[in-house]
Amino acid sequence: MQSLTLLRHLTLTNATHDDREPHLSAASGLVRVGDHLYMVADDENHIGVFSAHDHTVPGELLRVLPGDLPDGKKKRKAAKADFEALLALPAFADFPYGALLALGSGSRENRMTAALISLDEGGGVRRDIGLPRTIDFSPLYQALQREFTDVNIEGAFLDGEYLSLLQRGNKGSGRNARIRVALAPLIANLAHGAVSVSPDFVDIVDFTLGDIGGVPLGFTDAAALPNGGFVFTAVAEDTENSYADGACAGSAIGFVGADHRLRNVMALAGSPKVEGITAQVNGAALTLHLVTDPDDASVAAQLFTTALSSW
């Protein structure tokens, strides 16, 4: 079992509603760019921005979609864009210093939106150009609906010349998979502000991740590794579908090699519901940062770290 070290609770300088606490409560994707940690929350129209070095300073919410979500749990769940995945794109077109791409889960029609967030030369979000660009990703998700009975994209990362997407399984549909899409044509579409056609999937590889206490593990996020593989997070959530929340039986991290084979899965101590990951490699050492989603708006999500001497 892999131990975790708590770095901070994800407190904020501002909240999105007078009745909501000033913290991020549903961290679902994590990316580091320079000195910044960026997080999507699946119940916000914003991203969270935190220091990668000073874990005592509250983070900040930056709006990525217009409008406000209702405050009631059921109404908010029905209306939210359900941002579950976040990745950093290299420089292209009108984004000379790259961009963040936040992706909805695709589990409902209103969850097929993406936000393209321009970065500056220091890796910060550009604040002089108005709201981020909203992209309709429904052609991609509709193509995925032909492959999966219950689409639920929970993670995304760049894998060389590909965009890799992670489909999360559950008790009702236990299929976990990594889907690869050619990156160059997708970026060309993003440069024009739309994903106008269904992408051709390079490949779809299924994975059996095991279970915790009889509850199957499902992908929640991943980060690319320099050996051509990736490290991922997975959660054993007791739910039959991609919409309903369930009790968390535990979380795990695991590794997939460049040959697309599952290498190892390790349960995480303490059973937090881990939904986002970044990875920093220094020789044979690997440092991971992970964020949680407690499924409770009154509870702050947490940032953890753990290190592996070999992987």
Image (cartoon, rainbow, N blue to C red):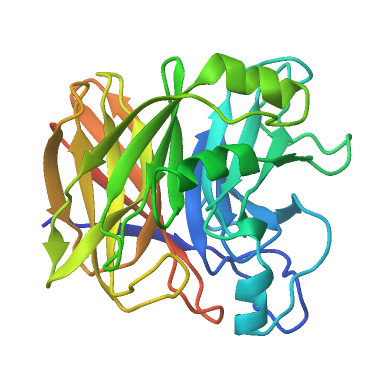
- 300 and 173: which one is in front? 173
Quadrant position of the N terminus in the picture: bottom left
Q: Where is residue 222 in the image (x, y as percent from the top left)?
A: 36, 40
Residue 53 visible in the displayed image:
no
At 61% across and 43% down in the image, what residue appears? 102
Q: In which quarter of the image is residue 45?
A: bottom right
Q: Position of residue 39 (x, y in %)?
A: 55, 50
At 19% across and 27% down in the image, what residue appears? 257
Residue 116 placement, left or right of 11: right
- 89 and 77: which one is in front? 77
Q: Quadrant of residue 260?
A: top left
Residue 229 visible in the displayed image:
yes
Quadrant position of the C terminus in the picture: top left
Q: Where is residue 90 in the image (x, y as percent from the top left)?
A: 59, 19
Residue 223 placement, left or right of 256: right
At 74% across and 21% down in the image, what residue appears? 191
Residue 225 placement, left or right of 183: left
At 40% across and 43% down in the image, what residue appears? 147
Establish if 158 lies above or below 185. Answer: below
